[in-house]
Image: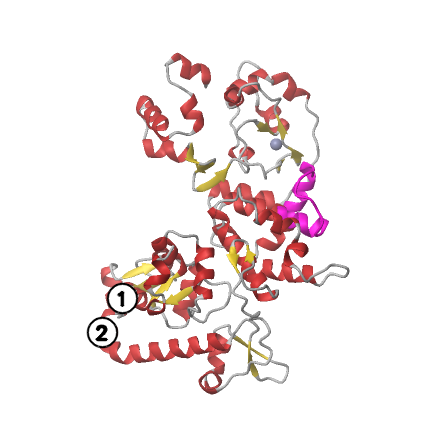
């Protein structure tokens, strides 16, 4: 690559750095589509961050100065020393958290270091130079890991819609490793000084927890406090390396969604004195909202107990009675009542409009008046799962327009979406308007006692538009 660019007098350094102008110039020179070349190129975003396909990578998560290979892959594909450029590079080898080759069950190896970084970036030239070294490398066995398989699949095939998929790649991968370190080595473990095979194990341990979302993480953190011989009174002490890592100043805004879950767990489970910072957000000294054991259903909530059960907000106790779940507060039950009355009132006045605008015929004919669940989720800036919940419980109107969409796909009528947006606003939308990280902003709303729509924990947060006053969104 260096030689080729030298021959055509194309400066290679800006290209290696991932500068947009260089990529565009190369596309022009080669007569290929700019968009396509940009998509497969490493793009520098500034501050040590890169964009790679749809993913986001940091200098820590992404190896820029050494080439790593699976010696077995190279050996089996390299035809001869004269033609090493025939071996395709595997994109996933660049990611620090991917340490093994699933095909050969062996560890990846770093090629010997170079004096100049740019020399180490020329894959074909490096293979040629280190041909003998690669041939001589012994195979170091490494068990296959679902954690690495997840990362590789995500890099190569795109993200899914789970909570862990929505974390940026550098956040998800390192979070798995550090959580696994805390699980395996306890609260006193140091963040540094572990071997590559150790980190592989830690990553797999952490992935087991984080793949199942924020509740699973919160459960895991709760379990840590209940281990014998561990001082569970102070969260910093208890979570050890996990908390030390999350506090790191070098971690960017992309870590906020993860920090937010940990923060919420801390505020809910520890008594934190007013003003004490928990991952950058001061405690309001509000008593833990967790012990709701005495909360019972009364009045409106009691009359709608069956619906609360259906909504995932209540459960049946041993005696067959319906009781609110642990996380449900009186405030949440009030929000439920407010929401139910709001939609009930809306229904009677919109009844006429509903039959014409929401009618199945209309949906089928125009196609304009409905959106896929995914599009609705994007528009509301909430998860697909949340849209499903809103449809299921009548807050959004969904119809089945099988002629327009994949058979059986649920679509959301544009009218009901517009109606919904008139009264409600999601945390994702608020974060975009205010240009602030979701995590920090949601704590601010929580501290200002702004009511959420009553929904289970694993769904996106949605607020009443009228409650979010201008002060909250404009104040720095
Ligand atoms: Zn291999």
Label 2 close to label 1 by CB (< 8 Å): yes
- Residue at the far right in the pictured view: 229
The residue at 70%/35% (across/down) is 141
| 388 with respect to 354 (left or right) | right
Report helix, strand or loop for mark 1: helix
Residue at mark 2: C-beta within 8 A of ligand 1: no
Q: Quadrant of residue 128?
A: top right
Q: Secondary structure at mark 2?
A: helix
Point out which mark residue 353 bears.
2
Pinpoint residue 155: horizontal percent, then vertical percent: 50, 41
Tell me which corner region of the image, top left, top right, bottom left or bottom right, holds residue 337: bottom left
When asked about the image quadrant of residue 142, the answer is top right
Q: Would residue 200 be found to the left or right of residue 433 on screen?
A: right
187 or 209: nearer the eye?
Answer: 187
In screen coordinates, is 142 left or right of 476? Answer: right
Q: Image quadrant for the C terminus?
A: bottom left
Q: Main secondary structure of the magenta part?
A: helix
Does the segment drawn in magenta span residue 126? no
**To which residue does mark 1 refer?**
415
* First to last magenta residue range: 178-204
Asked if the residue at label 1 sits under 8 Å from ligand 1, the reply is no
Viewer-closest of 109 and 468: 468
Mark 2 → mark 1, Cα distance in angstroms? 10 Å
**Residue lying at the far front of the rendered structure:** 275
- Please determine whether, in this image, residue 33 is positioned above or below residue 205: above
Q: Earlier in the sequence, mark 2 or mark 1?
A: 2
Q: Position of residue 94 (x, y in %)?
A: 54, 33
């Amino acid at each position: 690559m260096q030689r080729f660019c030298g021959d055509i007098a194309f400066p290679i350094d800006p290209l290696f750095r991932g500068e947009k102008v260089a990529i565009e110039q190369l596309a022009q020179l080669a007569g290929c589509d700019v968009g396509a070349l940009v998509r497969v190129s490493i793009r520098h975003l500034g501050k040590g961050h890169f964009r790679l396909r749809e993913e986001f990578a940091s200098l820590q998560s992404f190896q820029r100065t050494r080439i790593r290979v699976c010696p077995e892959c190279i050996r089996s594909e390299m035809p001869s020393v004269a033609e090493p450029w025939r071996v395709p590079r595997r994109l996933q080898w660049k990611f620090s958290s991917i340490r093994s080759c699933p095909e050969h069950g062996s560890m990846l190896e770093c090629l010997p270091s170079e004096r100049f970084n740019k020399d180490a970036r020329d894959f074909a030239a490096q293979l040629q130079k280190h041909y003998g070294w690669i041939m001589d490398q012994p195979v170091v066995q490494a068990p296959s890991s679902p954690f690495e398989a997840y990362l590789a699949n995500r890099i190569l095939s795109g993200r899914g819609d789970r909570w862990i998929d929505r974390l940026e790649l550098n956040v998800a991968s390192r979070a798995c490793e550090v959580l696994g370190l805390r699980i395996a080595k306890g609260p006193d473990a140091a963040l540094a000084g572990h071997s590559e095979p150790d980190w592989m194990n830690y990553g797999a341990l952490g992935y087991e927890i984080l793949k199942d979302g924020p509740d699973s993480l919160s459960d895991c953190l709760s379990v840590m406090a209940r281990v014998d011989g561990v001082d569970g009174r102070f969260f910093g002490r208890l979570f050890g390396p996990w908390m030390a890592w999350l506090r790191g100043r070098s971690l960017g805004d992309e870590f906020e969604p993860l920090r937010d879950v940990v923060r919420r767990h801390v505020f809910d489970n520890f008594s934190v004195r007013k003003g004490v910072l928990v991952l950058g957000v001061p405690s309001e000294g509000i008593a833990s909202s967790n012990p709701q054991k005495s909360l019972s259903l009364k009045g409106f909530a009691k009359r709608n107990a069956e619906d609360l059960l259906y909504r995932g907000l209540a459960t049946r106790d041993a005696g067959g009675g319906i009781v609110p779940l642990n996380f449900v507060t009186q405030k949440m039950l009030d929000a439920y009542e407010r929401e139910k009355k709001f939609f009930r009132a809306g229904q009677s006045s919109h009844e006429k409009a509903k039959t014409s605008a929401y009618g199945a015929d209309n949906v089928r004919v125009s196609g304009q008046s409905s959106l896929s669940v995914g599009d609705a989720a994007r528009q509301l800036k909430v998860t697909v799962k949340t849209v499903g919940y809103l449809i299921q419980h009548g807050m959004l109107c969904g119809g089945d327009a099988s002629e327009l969409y994949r058979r059986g796909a649920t679509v959301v009528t544009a009218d009901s979406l517009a109606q919904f947006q008139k009264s409600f606003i999601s945390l994702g939308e608020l974060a975009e308007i205010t240009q602030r990280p979701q995590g920090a902003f949601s704590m601010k709303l929580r501290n200002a006692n702004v009511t959420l729509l009553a929904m289970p924990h694993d769904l996106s947060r949605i607020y009443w538009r009228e409650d979010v006053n201008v002060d909250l969104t404009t104040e720095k």
